[in-house]
Image (cartoon, rainbow, N blue to C red):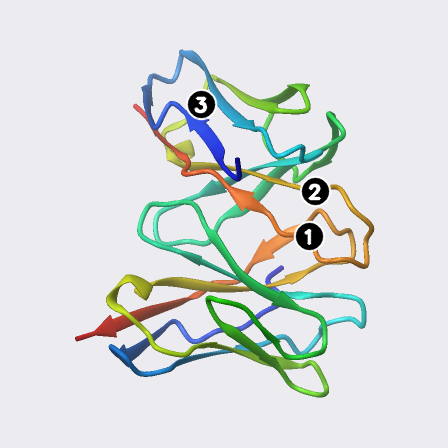
Amino acid sequence: DTEVTQTPKHLVMGMTNKKSLKCEQHMGHRAMYWYKQKAKKPPELMFVYSYEKLSINESVPSRFSPECPNSSLLNLHLHALQPEDSALYLCASSQQILRLLGNEQFFGPGTRLTVL
Amino acid sequence: DAKTTQPPSMDCAEGRAANLPCNHSTISGNEYVYWYRQIHSQGPQYIIHGLKNNETNEMASLIITEDRKSSTLILPHATLRDTAVYYCIVRVENFNKFYFGSGTKLNVKP
């Protein structure tokens, strides 16, 4: 199984709602990532989890709250979002290996989020 | 901070080789060059990566200059399904960080 799955595929939410995005992989990868991608722009790194611990937060606003409950699952909890947060949210995973070796990331299909 | 520079778009005739350039003049000695592509509204797909030697796999070839300041991704026989945005990425020193450049939109035409 070389797949990263993301649910839901599409999500529409109001600015007062609380929702969660889910990501799952069964490749035994111990690094997992959240990216945000606006239309016609490249993906931007948001968070990195390494061995279920948050290792990188790219100064993301606190209305985005990541969670890694186990080595296969990654969640992104959303609260009080703004319309400008509408974007494609991508999850990725990779093996946690030595720095000097290649480290391919596998991406999921993304969740298309619209904030009204 | 993007560490790569790519042309915004390129055209290629179906069946011909597509050569996509990337400049990464500030690359460090232990940083790899990665190539991904993204077909409209899908997740990015890994293509190939390399450190200093040329690399080839079933999808593409990667040619890295001797000074490592630039590279070229070669799709040997482009098909219409290769139409996508191609991203050249330099993996920064903290190996979990991928910073995508602006990418090249490759249009393969019949």
- Seen at 70% across and 79% down, the residue is B53
Disc 2 to disc 3, how far (Cα)? 31 Å
Q: Residue A86 placed where, x, y %?
A: 37, 33
Residue at numbered disc 2: A95
Kindly identify the amino acid type of the residue bearing the numbered disc 2.
Answer: Gln
Q: Residue B95 placed where, x, y %?
A: 75, 51
Q: Residue A55 placed where, x, y %?
A: 76, 34
Classify 10 Å Cα crowding around label 2: few (below 14), some (14-19), many (20 and above). Answer: some
Chain that bears disc 1: A
Kindly identify the amino acid type of the residue bearing the numbered disc 3.
Answer: Leu
Residue at numbered disc 1: A103
As drawn, is A101 to the left or to the right of A43?
Answer: right
Classify 10 Å Cα crowding around label 3: few (below 14), some (14-19), many (20 and above). Answer: many
- Seen at 77% across and 57% down, the residue is A101
Q: Secondary structure at mark 3?
A: loop
Disc 3 to disc 1, how far (Cα)? 32 Å
Say above or below: B83 vs A24. below
Chain that bears disc 3: A
Kindly identify the amino acid type of the residue bearing the numbered disc 1.
Answer: Asn
As drawn, is B23 to the left or to the right of B7?
Answer: right
Q: Nearer the viewer, mark 2 or mark 3?
A: 2
State the quadrant of the N terminus of chain B. Answer: bottom right
Chain that bears disc 2: A
Residue at numbered disc 3: A81
Q: Earlier in the sequence, mark 2 or mark 3?
A: 3
Q: Secondary structure at mark 1?
A: loop
Q: Quadrant of residue A67?
A: top right
